[in-house]
Image: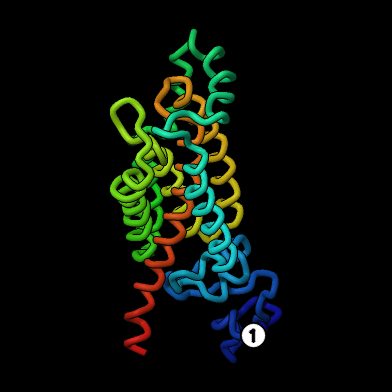
Amino acid sequence: MSTASGAPDPSGADRFPDRNRRPDTRHPETSETPGAPPPEYAASVDPAVRRTAGIPGHTANPRVTAATAAVGATVAATLPLSFPPGGGPTTFDLAVDERVDPRLDPRPWIAEVLTLATNTGVVLAILCAGAAWFAWQRRWWETATMVLVPEAAVAINAWVLKPLWSRPLHDYLAYPSGHTVHLVAVVTTLVLLLRSIRARVVIIALTTAAWCGAAVGMLALDYHLATDVLGGAAAGIALAIGLYWVAVHLARVPRARSG
């Protein structure tokens, strides 16, 4: 307290103006812990994920992913049962071709544009962007998983699934579509690793639209049949989910041993 003349209080209270100040409850202090996520991040994350944040494997629901992988594997495995001898087009393939070809045959450049979503360079750019995002956050397990899981899925498709079902088209094995497996595996892995539900929904919606357009383009250009693309999407989902959980298990082994 100061004197009436404005001179400083001899007791020295004015020298410590903050000593008796009441805390401002309107702006609570935030955590100063290095690496702690901002409050707005926590608000956008699934509560179940927040409780186990940082532990590999808990950004995805085991039951939901297991059911999704089972459906994908079932579709990929049963579609070849409809193939005629020699792996030619099915009735479904012919019906789809009749609707696609007349519209895009006069304008093949449109089909070329539509297939860009499954172009290897575009898919690798998505993969690298996802890996860079996790690396920027120093989430190293997610970074490695983002790179390894989709590429392992492509290798399994090329070396195991294609020879297994052996459906020839032109001079290559067409089922399941390798470009489709690559795109779907990259996006599925990214969705599994992301913690934001909103980001997952947006990415799934955009990818579904891009995949539908790419499917039309590949059919119009005679790169694949409709069942090749459907089987590729199903196989990509099943492979990515399965390999993701393998990566989770491998990450937990050192933790269990050290514990």
Q: Farthest top residue?
A: 106
Badge 1 marks a residue whose secondary structure is loop
Q: Which residue shows up at 44% across the image and 26% down it? A: 218
x and y percentages locating residue 120 in the rendered image: 34, 36
Q: Is residue 159 visible?
A: yes
The residue that appears at 37% across and 32% down in the rendered structure is: 119
Q: Residue furthest front?
A: 85
Please report the residue visible at 35 percent of the width from the left and 32 percent of the height from the top: 168
Colour style of the rendered protein structure:
rainbow
Quadrant location of the N terminus? bottom right
Circle 1 residues within 10 Å: few <14, some 14–19, many ≥20? few
The residue closer to the viewer here, 187 or 170, is 170
- Rendered position, 113 above or below 255: above
**Residue 250 at x, y = what percent?**
35, 72
Q: Is residue 122 visible?
A: no
Q: Is residue 156 above or below residue 7?
A: above
Q: How many marks?
A: 1
- Residue 98 lies left or right of residue 123; in this view the side is right
Q: Quadrant of residue 55?
A: bottom left
User: Which residue is nearer to you in this view: 127 or 253?
Assistant: 253
Place of residue 159 in the rendered image (x, y in percent of width and height, measured from the top left): 28, 48
Q: Is residue 18 left or right of residue 191?
A: right
- Residue position marked by numbered label 1 in the rendering: 20
Q: Position of residue 97 (x, y in %)?
A: 53, 22
The residue type indicated by label 1 comes to: Asn
In the image, what residue occupies the spot 52% across and 75% down? 52
- Compared to residue 14, the image places residue 125 above or below, namely above
Q: Quadrant of the C terminus?
A: bottom left
